[in-house]
Structures are given as structure tokens and as C-alpha cells.
Image: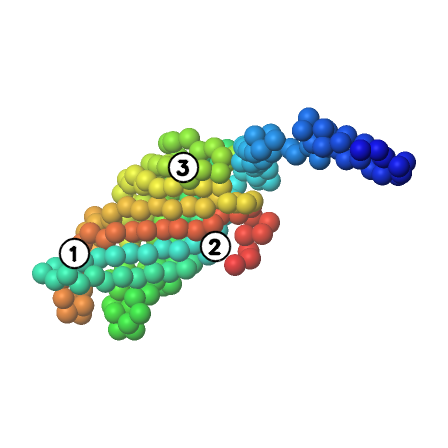
Amino acid sequence: MSLRSPLLLLLLLFSCTDSQNHDNGTIGVPVPASTSTGAAATIEAAASEAALPPLTLAVVTTRYGKAEFYCRVLGSIGVITGQSNKLHGQVDLHGHTLDFHLPLETLHTGIGQRDRDMHKLLRIDKHPNARFTGTLDSGFDPQSPEKQPVSAEGVFYLNGREQPLRVDGFLQRDGDGIRLQAQWMLNIADFGLDPPATFLMDIHNDLEINISGRLIPPRVAALP
């Protein structure tokens, strides 16, 4: 077959060259899947391992933490609950100390008469606050994003009395602050308190206490 047109000849030559280059992988070379996947994995790993920025201050505080209590009604499956969103406190991450207090008048159960009975029981007119001060006896790394178990040994104050108390909970870095969760059992009889007859039911002396909150540097702690 003879090629009479130079243009046709050039087209045929280009077509052959293009086909050969595709076979050799020199035109339109795709990025190998393994290479792109590996690069993405490397970037993701680097991002997850990137250190959190350091906290600006060693002391973090809250004025809007949450405190809850649960107590069982004897001879029943009933439970009385109460809560407050006015837990005040601070944690010194360098000194490993903590100090929390709760204005007891801010505790509410959702029933007015029961609240009045409870406040009378707690004698808030003479001892308006419950307080816990202590020392963290387990390490906490504020640069880790993980939820870390911690414990504290200290003293709990209620009704003008004090008792040693160990509290177990969790701390977790949360932006420029720390998120706190803790739980413990408290026997009100240890503080000279007994459920009043006006409750019209027998209340177990042991209360389950839960607290939680986000603690932040004091410069912004006044904001809710």
C-alpha cells in the first residue's frame, strides 16, 4: 500500500508513537494507587499525632459545672434525683491540686416542697456550701487528646463537718481547657444528717454523686 499524502503519513507515524508510549507508560502516566494511598495515610497519621497546643495557664476553672445526686427510696425501686449547674472549682495542673464547692441552695429535685425539705435537711442557712479539696495522685498529660483516668485524695466538707474522701474520675483535654467527670458515694450520716420525716418516705443514707464540667483558663471562666 503506498502513501500518497505526506499528511496521512505523519498521522500514521504519530498514532504508532502514541500507542507505543501508552504501552510503555510514558504518556498519561497515572499515580500508582499504592503511592497515593500511602501519602494519604502518612498525612492522616501526622495530623493525628500532631501535638496539641500547650494550655496558656496551669490553672483551669469553672463556675458552671454540673453536680447531680441519686438516692434510693428504701423498700422501693424509686430514686430521688437532684442537680445543680452552679458547681464552682479549679484544678492546678502544675501543683496537682483541686478545689470544688457547690452552693447547696442551687440543688433542685423538680418538686418545690421536696426542695425545701432537702435544703432544711442540709441546713443551708448555717452551712450553705459543700466543698471538696484534694490532690491528684495520678498523672495527667494535658497534651494528650485521650480520656485519662485520674484519682484524687482529699477532704469533703458538709454541714460543718469533714471526712476524708477519695474520688475517681476522668480528665480529658478539650480545646483550651479540660473536661472533667467524677463519681463517688457519700453517706450523709457521716456528716450528722438524717432524712427528715417530712420526706414521708425512708431515704437511703448513701447518695451517688456525679460531677462534670469544662474547666478553662480564668481569663474566660466568667463566660457560661
Label 1: few (<14), some (14–19) or many (≥20) C-alpha neighbours in 10 Å: some
**Which amino acid type corresponds to the residue marked 1 in the rendered image?**
His
**Residue that mark 1 sits on:** 204
Of residues 210 and 145, the one drawn nearer to the viewer in this rendering: 145
Marked residue nearer the N-terminal end (1 or 2): 2
Is residue 160 among the parts visible in the rendering?
no
Of residues 208 and 95, the one drawn nearer to the viewer in this rendering: 208
Label 2: few (<14), some (14–19) or many (≥20) C-alpha neighbours in 10 Å: many
- Point out the residue furthest to the bottom here: 112
Residue 101 drawn at (x, y percent): 40, 51
Residue at 20 percent of width and 52 percent of height: 206
Q: Which mark is residue 148?
A: 3
Residue at 23 percent of width and 62 percent of height: 80
**Quadrant (top left, top right, bottom left, bottom right) of the N terminus:** top right
Residue at 30 percent of width and 66 percent of height: 109
**Which amino acid type corresponds to the residue marked 3 in the rendered image?**
Gln
Q: Residue 63 carries which label?
A: 2
Marked residue nearer the N-terminal end (3 or 1): 3
- Point out the residue furthest to the top here: 24
Residue 76 drawn at (x, y percent): 12, 62
Q: Circle 1 — which element?
A: strand
Mark 3 vs 2: CB contact within 8 A: no
Q: Circle 3 — which element?
A: strand
